[in-house]
Image (cartoon, grey):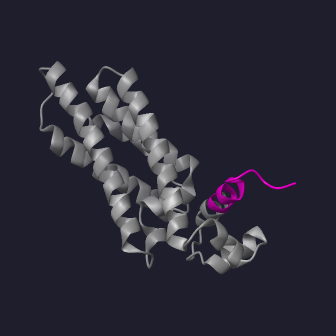
């Protein structure tokens, strides 16, 4: 019985993400990916034109997942400061649930790959920072006591988040970033 269209493609992406979760990470080759899936490299290229296209599939998953959740947070939370906190918490929780994606987000998995992949991840973080900035502008407009420039505060939160992702990856995915944020958020969002 033939597989539904797209099922093998999804299986390839899931396996690639799982391979990126290995604490002793090494560059993933198409030969290793094909062996893990028990298919030929040619079979991989029937679904993806290149390895870069496989990574683009992972980046697309990251973008769709994170920004659909970010939109929900923006719609459901009226308080801008709480919105910003929930956005950071959400991204850190996403990372914990998808450790292989952290290697893509931090750029570790993209070293030696096409430069457009890193550019796309940079755009992802620019967009996430803009979402934080929007939340913090909302906080400043509704709270006369909210001080500080929204852009500077958003940049600080983004730096914290990216640093937390790197720390999580460097720890072999043992040092959970959401646990640190729970204790540190009052210093970041006051």
Q: Is residue 58 above or below residue 25?
A: above
User: In the picture, which quadrant includes the C terminus?
Assistant: top left
Badge count: 0
In the image, what residue occupies the spot 65% across and 55% down? 10
Q: Name the residue furthest right.
A: 1
In-image side of 14 versus 115 (left or right) = right
The residue stretch that appears in magenta = 1-13
In the image, what residue occupies the spot 28% across and 46% down? 129
Q: Is residue 58 above or below residue 116?
A: above
Q: Nearer the viewer, residue 67 or 175?
A: 67
Task: Tell me where residue 126 appears, x and y as whole percent.
Answer: 28, 51
Q: Is residue 144 above or below residue 43?
A: above
Q: Nearer the viewer, residue 174 or 42?
A: 42
In the image, what residue occupies the spot 66% across and 62% down? 12
**Magenta-drawn stretch contains 7:** yes
Q: Is residue 118 visible?
A: yes
Q: Is residue 22 visible?
A: no
Task: Tell me where residue 32 appears, x and y as whole percent.
Answer: 68, 77
Q: Is residue 68 above or below residue 12?
A: above
**Magenta-drawn stretch contains 64:** no
Q: Nearer the viewer, residue 22 or 53?
A: 53
In-image side of 15 versus 59 (left or right) = right
């Amino acid at each position: 019985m033939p597989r539904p269209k797209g099922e093998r493609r999804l299986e390839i992406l899931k396996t690639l993400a799982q391979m990126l979760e290995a604490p002793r990470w090494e560059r993933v080759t198409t030969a290793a990916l094909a062996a893990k899936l028990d298919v030929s490299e040619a079979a991989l290229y029937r679904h993806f034109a290149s390895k870069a296209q496989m990574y683009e599939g992972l980046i697309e998953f990251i973008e769709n997942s994170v920004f659909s959740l970010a939109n929900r947070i923006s719609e459901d939370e009226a308080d801008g400061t709480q919105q910003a906190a929930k956005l950071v918490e959400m991204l850190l929780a996403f990372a914990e649930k998808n450790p292989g994606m952290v290697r893509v987000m931090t750029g570790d998995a993209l070293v030696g790959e096409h430069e457009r992949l890193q550019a796309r991840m940079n755009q992802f973080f620019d967009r996430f920072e803009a979402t934080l900035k929007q939340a913090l502008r909302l906080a400043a407009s509704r709270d006369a006591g909210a001080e500080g420039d929204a852009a500077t505060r958003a940049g600080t939160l983004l730096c914290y988040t990216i640093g937390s992702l790197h720390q999580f990856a460097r720890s072999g995915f043992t040092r959970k970033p959401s646990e640190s944020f729970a204790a540190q958020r009052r210093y970041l969002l006051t």
